[in-house]
Amino acid sequence: MRYKLRMTIGVVLIFLISGCFMVGPDYKRPSTPVAAKWNESGDDSLKYSREEYRDWWTVFNDPVLTRLIDLAYRQNLSLRTAGVRVLESRAQLGIAIGEFYPQQQVATASVSYNRIPISLPYLLNSNTYWTDSFGLQAAWEIDLWGKLRRAIESADDAFLASVANYDNALVTLTGDVASSYVQIRTIETQIAIARDNVERQKTALKIANSRFRYGTATKRDVYQAENVLGATEATIPQLTIQLNQTKNSLNVLLGMPPGQLGDLLSGPTKIPTAPVSATVGVPADLLRRRPDIRAAELQAAAQCAQIGYAKADLFPTFTLMGNVGTFASDVGRTSLGDVFQSGTLAYSAGPTLQWNFLNYGQITNNVRLQDAKFQEALLNYQNTILTAQQDVENGITVFIESRHQTDFLSQSVVAAEGALRIAIIQYRQGIADFTTVLTAEQNLYQAQNSQAMAMGSIALGLIATYRAMGGGWQIREGHEFIPEKTRAEMTDRTNWGTILTPGLSQPKAPGLPGPQDQMKPPVGLPEF
């Protein structure tokens, strides 16, 4: 009686200890190098109120751009791949949770025909006989050192990191679609400028030919006019190549084969106009908004749990084992049917201990390996923060300086138009030589082309800024990670339990700052 009592108390103590003790470090957010303000904080083009940039592309007031981003969100294949990876991590979390319960649960049944060698003596009527058996086996490793809970913690953080990676893919997608669209409109404007200058230069060539025929100019003027005209005409095929390549890239972003944009780009062909000012908040906002920063920190937290998972192997493993079954044979007075009788029942149960104490440093070095990986993940997290700030600063600089550049180029275009107009008049009157006309033509074309590129850079700079601020992923809130058609296909192939149930694959708090606020297991744990 005392033995049973001591054994019961021992088992209870093991469970109590296993519920409150875990080896290995708990994750703590490292110091983060975040600036207090942006370098251009004194510029009038910037505002600092907090915004989430859910649909930042609407600031351009371009319905075509809005339509393209909506289509890309629904059809982009890379985004769907990221969504499937969320389901992969969700299933992996279910595997980790399943390991916390009895790891071995086996039902066995067998029937065998046996023969004893004739060379051996035997006491049976025959040297052959039948046996049958039924049994159940169970084994439950007690999580005394927190190994299994560390595995769940790591899988949970990895799941949340996959969600953040999906959000980052969405941020990248919206930025790429917007940038491609602006580039298309910019190139179209450049082509229109080139064609307009070709017509202007053809007029100058006619004037040169006319003066040559009447003997008031030399053939050199004609050759020079043809040279400038040919150089301008040659830019159109090159720009057309860039235009078609950019359109093909946009097709892929939209999940469509190249060359099938159709009427998607129908509408005004002007370069999208960026607003006069942009709201950029403060650098600290990046920690909660940028999904790649969240993903980097969650990956670090997941790796931190792996240290404890590896370290637990240094300690002994306690497992509760149990076997129960029946056995019968047709030897003597017994029969195979006796397997269902209580007299054939046998069972065993009790704890076992396993300790790999002679591991020749393998486990210790595995702990060191996981710790080094954790340190690498921390450095990657800190570097991701620095890179994010660099991205924002670069976008802001392009946005502000391109606007200044456009203002200067607008004055340059007006001056170049005036200079060309006067040069042609003076050439007709014989006051100026034709080189003056050609120089004025080239200056005008260069000024107009540069102005178009600078106007496109304003929009691209603002897009880069919003993208660097981590805007755009919020549009997936309330939606599933994979489309309904894909979900139906996967359900037809495999029993996904509750994982594919709408809403249950969403984490509790996708936008909170860092793993410390996201460590709780998500709602609706997957079946295992």
Image (cartoon, helix red, strand yellow):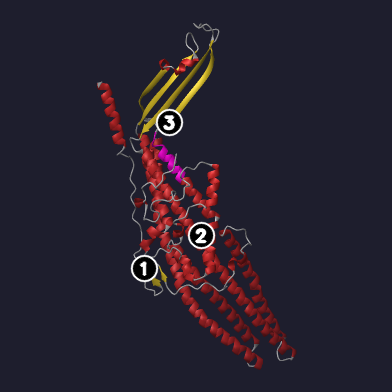
Closer to us: 165 or 454: 165
Question: Which residue is identified by label 2?
Answer: 173
Quarter in which the C terminus is drawn = top left
User: Which is in the foreground here, disc 2 or disc 3?
Assistant: 3
Closer to us: 527 or 255: 527
Closer to us: 292 or 443: 292
For image coordinates 53% across by 18% down, the residue present is 112
Crowding at label 1, few (<14), some or many (≥20) Cα neighbours within 10 Å? few
Question: Which residue is identified by label 1?
Answer: 49
Crowding at label 3, few (<14), some or many (≥20) Cα neighbours within 10 Å? some
The image shows residue 356, relative to residue 479, as above or below, that is above
Secondary structure of the magenta portion, mostly?
helix
Mark 2 vs 3, N-terminal side: 3
For image coordinates 60% across by 88% down, the residue present is 421
Mark 2 vs 1, N-terminal side: 1
Q: For this view, does 431 lie left or right of residue 120? A: right
Q: CA distance from mark 3 to mark 1?
A: 56 Å
Q: Is residue 172 magenta?
A: no
Residue sitting at the far left: 2
Residue 259 horizontal/vertical position (percent): 64, 62
Q: Is residue 93 magenta?
A: yes
Looking at the rendered structure, the secondary structure element under dot 2 is helix
Tell me, for residue 104, which label it has, or none. Answer: 3
User: In the rendered structure, which segment of residues is drawn in magenta?
Assistant: 90-101
Residue 258 horizontal/vertical position (percent): 62, 60
Name the kind of residue labelled 1 in the image. Ser
Q: For this view, does 433 lie left or right of residue 115? A: right
Closer to us: 147 or 166: 166
The image shows residue 248, relative to residue 402, as above or below, that is above
Residue 145 horizontal/vertical position (percent): 33, 36
Q: CA distance from mark 2 to mark 1?
A: 25 Å
Please count the marks in the image: 3
